[in-house]
Amino acid sequence: MTRTFTIRQLTKEFGVTARALRFYEEEDLIAPARRGQTRLYNARDRARIVLILRGRRVGFSLAELRELLDLYEGLGGSSGQMVEARRKFQERIAVLERQKVDIEQSLSELRDGIQSIDSALSAQMAN
C-alpha cells in the first residue's frame, strides 16, 4: 500500500499553511487524491512540494516552477529536458549572484552608516 499524507501532516512537516498547499493544487503543481473532502497526498505530491518550496526560496516564479516540475518528471527521459533544466538553474544562479553582490554592497553601506552615527554620537557625548 502506498503511503499517503494528510494536509495537516504536510503543513506541520514543511511549515506552510494549508492555504498554500491548496493554492499549489489550484495552480496544478500538485494533485492530491480526494476521499470525500479530505485531500490525500502521495509520495509524488510530497516530492513536488519539496521542489516547489526550494524553488520559491531561490526565487522561481510559479510558471518557472511548473516548467521545472514538468522537466523533473521527465528527467529519466530526454537529455534535452535535462539541458533545459540545467540552463534554468544556471540562469537562477546568475540572478542570485548579482543579488548577492547588491546585498553585500548594501550591508557595507549600512555598516558605514552605523559607524558614522556612532562617531557623531561619541563626539556629542564628549562635548
Image (cartoon, helix red, strand yellow):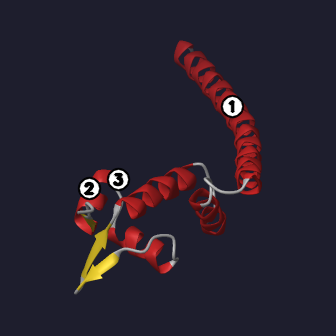
Coordinates of residue 77 in the picture (x, y in percent):
65, 57
Which residue is pictured at 59% across the width and 57% down the height?
72
Q: Residues within 10 Å of mark 1 (few under 14, many from 20)?
A: few
Coordinates of residue 73 in the picture (x, y in percent):
57, 61
Name the residue that disc number 3 marks: 14
Q: Residues within 10 Å of mark 3 (few under 14, many from 20)?
A: few
Marks 3 and 2, how far apart at CA: 6 Å
Name the residue that disc number 2 marks: 12
Quadrant location, the N terminus? bottom left
Marks 2 and 1, how far apart at CA: 34 Å
Quadrant location, the C terminus? top right
Q: Among all residues in the image, which is located at the extreme bottom?
A: 36
Question: In the structure shown, which secondary structural element does the residue marked by tag 1 occupy?
Answer: helix
Of the pair 106 and 29, the residue shown nearer to us: 29
Front position among marks 2 and 1: 2
Question: In the structure shown, which secondary structural element does the residue marked by tag 3 occupy?
Answer: helix
Q: Are marks 3 and 2 in contact (CB under 8 Å)?
A: yes
The answer to whether 110 is drawn above or below residue 54 in the figure is: above
Name the N-terminal-most of marks 2 and 1. Answer: 2
Name the N-terminal-most of marks 1 and 3. Answer: 3
Figure quadrant of residue 31 = bottom left
The amino acid type of the residue labelled 3 equals Phe
Marks 1 and 3, how far apart at CA: 29 Å
The answer to whether 76 is drawn above or below residue 115 in the figure is: below
Name the residue that disc number 1 marks: 104
